Image: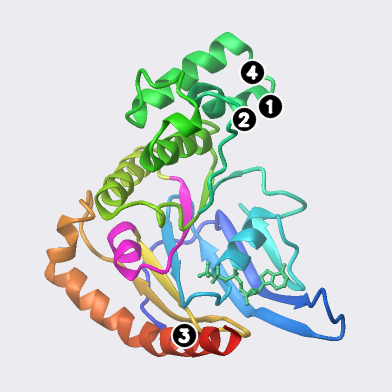
Amino acid sequence: MQTQSSSKAQAAPALWLDNISCTFISKDDRSQRYTAVADTTLAIAPGEFVSVVGPTGCGKSTLLNVGAGLLTPSTGNVRVFGEPLEGVNRRAGYMFQSEALMPWRSALQNVIAGLQFRGMEDGAARQLGEEWLARVGLQGFGDRYPHQMSGGMRKRVALAQTLILDPDIILMDEPFSALDIQTRQLMENEVLELWSAKKKAVLFITHDLDEAIAMSDRVVVLSAGPATHPIGEFIIDLPRPRDVAEIRAHPRFVELHSQIWGVLRDEVLKGYQQQKKLA
Ligand SMILES: Nc1ncnc2c1ncn2[C@@H]1O[C@H](COP(=O)(O)OP(=O)(O)OP(=O)(O)O)[C@@H](O)[C@H]1O
């Protein structure tokens, strides 16, 4: 595995996936097993922004679900700030690729749903909700329902909905892949700005290498499946604050892109061949 060393002093990782393997049993034929992830160790330090890239279908979401406590690994351990994870990861907030908004709730009601679930008094929740709507550029849009908003606006609501709970770990699974490139870059910059203010640990799943490099402190490359595992790890030593569009022209970005793509390319081709066989 290609690795660059980091001089960062190591406290207990915010999230530590320790030697994780995930084997699924086929619903149709219970004798058939598929090992999606094998022997994968991944530690994310408090405040660190880590992206995981890999070919389509390799096991990225599986790993994220393990970190979220939504999927119990077949073998291996998960630790959250040094403590073994049992059940759902309550120190983590999630943002997934698919829409997670409740269509019957307004933007504000969606943003404050988690606060209400935690029992916060309505007036305080609404006030915090309005603050978060303003923070994600949606001041005055609190009464709109999801069907009355653009895809980018809905993503902003989802972002506020996640961050309002002030999670110590943020798990994002290709959150902006459905957006057009301009909206996507605006959202990426917004996420970076919000992240730099609070410096929470982020696990960001993407198959877009440019996005991974532009946003992260570290990029981990996964092999094609089955038995996906990390095959490369790169420290992204680009200056911050970053503008995700401008940083792409930085000579170091170009250099890192070429190094990482050198590792990822063969896996993408393997993943593509497998998808063709399955089609
Ligand atoms: N619950 C499950 N039961 C059976 N197989 C599963 C299950 N969840 C995932 N898999 C399989 O595990 C592999 C990895 O899936 P996963 O969704 O983690 O990949 P991914 O890298 O996130 O994919 P993509 O890039 O397309 O989002 C796939 O082959 C998938 O079909």
**Tag nearer the camera, 4 or 3:** 3
Disc ID at residue 120:
4
* Quadrant location, ligand no. 1: bottom right
Q: Which residue is mark 3?
A: 272
Relative to residue 146, is residue 106 depicted above or below?
A: above
Classify residue 90 by image quadrant. Answer: top right
Residue lying at 42% horizontally and 26% vertically, measured from the top left: 132
**Magenta segment:** 200-215
Q: Which residue is mark 2?
A: 114
Comes first in the chain, label 3 or label 2: 2
Q: Is residue 105 magenta?
A: no
x then y, percent, for residue 105? 58, 25
x then y, percent, for residue 244? 23, 55
**Tag nearer the camera, 3 or 1:** 3
Mark 4 → mark 3, Cα distance in angstroms: 48 Å
x then y, percent, for residue 89? 67, 49
State if disc 4 and disc 2 touch (CB < 8 Å): no
* Left or right of 20 in this view: 203: left
**Number of numbered markers:** 4
Amino acid at dot 3 = Tyr
Mark 2 → mark 4, Cα distance in angstroms: 9 Å
State if disc 3 and disc 4 touch (CB < 8 Å): no
Instruction: Compare residues 177 and 190 and report the one nearer the observer.
Output: 177
Q: Is residue 212 magenta?
A: yes
- For mark 1, give the secondary structure: helix
Q: Which residue is mark 1?
A: 117
